[in-house]
Image (cartoon, rainbow, N blue to C red):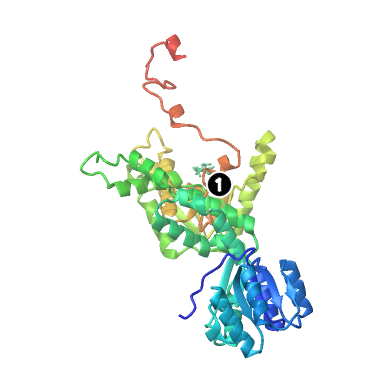
Amino acid sequence: MNFFPLFHQLNNKYCLIVGGGQVALRRAQALYAAGVCIDVISPVVGEQLVDVVKESGGNIDISYFDEALFNKKIQDKNYFMVMAATDDKAVNVTVYRCAKSNNMLVNIASDQSLCDVVFPAIIDRGPTTIAISNNGLSPVLTRVLKEKVEHVIPDNYGALADLMGKYRETIKDRIPNTKKRVAFLERIAKGSVAEAIFLGKPDRAEKILQAKLSQQTSESMEKEWAAQSSIDQPATDFSYTTQEKSAIYKVMAERRDMRHFNSQPLDEKIFKHILSAAHMAPSVGLMQPWRFIRITQQKIREDIFGIVNEERKLTADALDTRKGEFLKLKVEGILQCGELVIAALPEGREQHIFGRRTLPEMDLASLSCAIQNMWLAARAEGIGMGWVSLFDPKKLMQILNMPEGSWPIAILCIGHVDEFYEKPMLVLENWTTEQPLEDMLFENTWNDTKGQGGKEQSDNDT
Ligand SMILES: Cc1cc2nc3c(=O)[nH]c(=O)nc-3n(C[C@H](O)[C@H](O)[C@H](O)COP(=O)(O)O)c2cc1C
């Protein structure tokens, strides 16, 4: 490599060009774009070059090249570079010699052997800049390559660089581990954030980036999980390793009920993993009261969407004063998700007495455990899942040809998502807030948060 590519900060620097033709103009235009102040010496100067020089704040000497004058000029002014773009070889050589004896960078347009620096072909997707050079050997080849590269770099590539630059420090803070950070940045540069930018949706891209960032496990959060899983002290000989425990708490904390899906189809293997997770669930008396109906026909999917939409309106009416607010919420993703699955209780459940004689609803509790397993497995696989219960079960049974005695419990939307919500969507949408565990934890008797049993509370407790 004869010429090493470096990107120079040239703003407000001075450059002198000897020559006033087309080559001088192209050089001047490129330098002007970088904020350079350009002086020119030439007996003839084209109109366009005059404009560029004036706009850059430089001067033009309309004169033939004179070595003494030239020397004086370059000694008076601190040019970072001197260039010659003339077809007079003697002038070019003199410019080279004078510039070198004044320790200035020099570029002689027609002679690469008289150059400290050569001009590359530039693809400007500000702030991303691509410079192509073949050491000045073949400008045509450089131009052909430039056209090829331009073709594969989207016009708004620069906007992606802007966005990544804007979040650079935040990402550093949030993901201190270099390996993880690089992996994260690569996902940003190749994934849905870049896609949104290239589609001309910078706001959407920024939102996706923020969401992805908030999902990132900061090291402090990891420590918190590790603490929850009593990291240093295995509770028993059967305890999982710290890393395994972290993963368990992480997936529970980051599982979200999802309503927004993208169009990427779900891999069959991953789908089967998620179903297998359901089948590993505990169940009352091991009755395994779960049945899943995978919907593959678009018509059935649309019919299901129809009854959910009907129920959505009825629910809105029942909510009375919050009707408008409710209607703004996205309460299903049935038409967008990769896979649609109905979870149902089977018929004949009355035969199962074990654990259900007094609590027949334990079949439902068992099915719920299975659904939670699916939720966790999906999250661990990076797949979103949403539980939709806004439907009339009898209408759904009809659509699915379900037998008397069976009972549909959930419409499950499963699929790829652009982002996982940072908090429950109903919290993000200000529908409701989460309550702390302490409010739900009693001791000895109902509503007793202090374990006083039946004793009267003292004044201090109130
Ligand atoms: C049994 C059950 C039924 C649900 N049904 C719906 C539903 O019909 N529509 C909806 O938008 N969310 C539904 N959800 C999702 C809850 O609103 C969500 O789980 C809750 O807001 C907490 O959010 P998170 O799951 O992201 O933590 C359901 C959740 C459960 C557990």
Question: Does residue 221 show up?
Answer: yes
Q: Is residue 262 left or right of residue 29?
A: left
Q: Nearer the viewer, residue 168 or 357?
A: 168
Q: Residue at x 53, y 43 (%)?
A: 424
The residue sitting at the right extreme is 47
The image quarter containing residue 155 is bottom right
Q: Residue at x 66, y 89 (%)?
A: 87
The residue sitting at the left extreme is 237
Residue 383 image point, x, y percent: 47, 56
In the displayed structure, 77 sits above or below 21; it is above
**Which quadrant does the N terminus fall into?**
bottom left
Q: Is residue 267 left or right of residue 145?
A: left
Q: Amino acid at mark 1?
A: Pro
Kindly identify which residue carries mark 1: 393
Residue 372 image point, x, y percent: 43, 46
Residue 180 image point, x, y percent: 41, 56
* Numbered disc 1: secondary structure: helix
Q: Nearer the viewer, residue 380 or 281?
A: 380
